[in-house]
Amino acid sequence: MTDVIVVGGGPAGLSAALFASKNGLDTVCFDTDGTWMHKAHLFNYLGVGSIGGDSFMTTARQQADDFGVDRRQGEEVTGVDQSDDGFTVTSEGSEASAPYLVLATGANRDLAESLGCDFTDEDVVEVDVTMETSVENAYATGAMVRAEEWQAVISAGDGAAAALNILTKEKGDHFHDFDTPGDADEMFGEMRDSSE
């Protein structure tokens, strides 16, 4: 059993997976590469002057991989079931179980509906400020929860918020992921050593 399953490999899903895995949670991310980012060019992503969507996705995937996300590229999720132990996600090629689930499937809300998540009057998945749905320990992010607010930076923030709230549940208090330059030097060294 893993700790967190993320369904979706766009900015929301990769952000959730990155934050969870970077902070010690075993994380599986199912990524069909169906993100709208391939049609985008970003000028409005804070801290990034200009980047094409394909380049952004290449960098985001590499970052998630570098921090240990088990990214299952090309595996489409065919079902999600809930049990007393959490969630089981079935794809065309594998299965994964975890106590936490993050849905990041863009405007496709089918998995949230099959799981029994509540929806708003605008027909988006209803979440609280932590991105948790009406189904305990199931989170929804990005375009799933926002009517027509489909921005990469918003989606990435939603994914980060979901992961940080999972980390808060797991580690206690209000968990923060705030690195300093000294941390960066240490992490860069660890990543370099693991790739050699």
Image (spheres, rainbow, N blue to C red):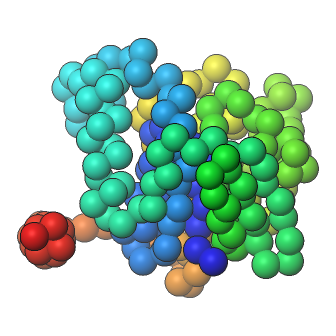
Left or right, residue 104 beside residue 87? left
- Kindly identify the residue that appears in the image at 67 percent across and 50 percent down: 91
Q: Looking at this rendering, what residue extends furthest in the bottom direction? A: 172
Q: Is residue 14 left or right of residue 140?
A: left
Say which quadrant the C terminus sits in.
Answer: bottom left
Residue 94, compared with residue 36, is above or below; it is below
Q: How many marks?
A: 0
Seen from this angle, which residue lies furthest front? 93
Q: Is residue 137 visible?
A: no
Q: Position of residue 47 (x, y in %)?
A: 23, 36
Residue 43 image position (x, y, % from top left): 28, 20
Name the image quarter holding residue 76. Answer: top right
Against 190, residue 121 (above or below) is above
The image position of residue 65, as x and y in percent, is 33, 57
Q: Give the residue at x 88% y 29%.
A: 121
Q: Is residue 7 above or below residue 32?
A: below
Q: Nearer the viewer, residue 29 or 121?
A: 29
Would residue 161 appear left or right of 92 to someone viewing this image? left
On screen, residue 90 versus residue 188, left or right, reads right
Q: Nearer the viewer, residue 16 or 75?
A: 75
- What residue is drawn where x is 65% and y is 65%? 96
Residue 144 in view in this figure: yes
Q: Quadrant of residue 87?
A: bottom right
Image quarter hosting the N terminus? bottom right
Residue plotted at (67% across, 71% down): 98
Residue 25 position in % (x across, y down): 48, 74
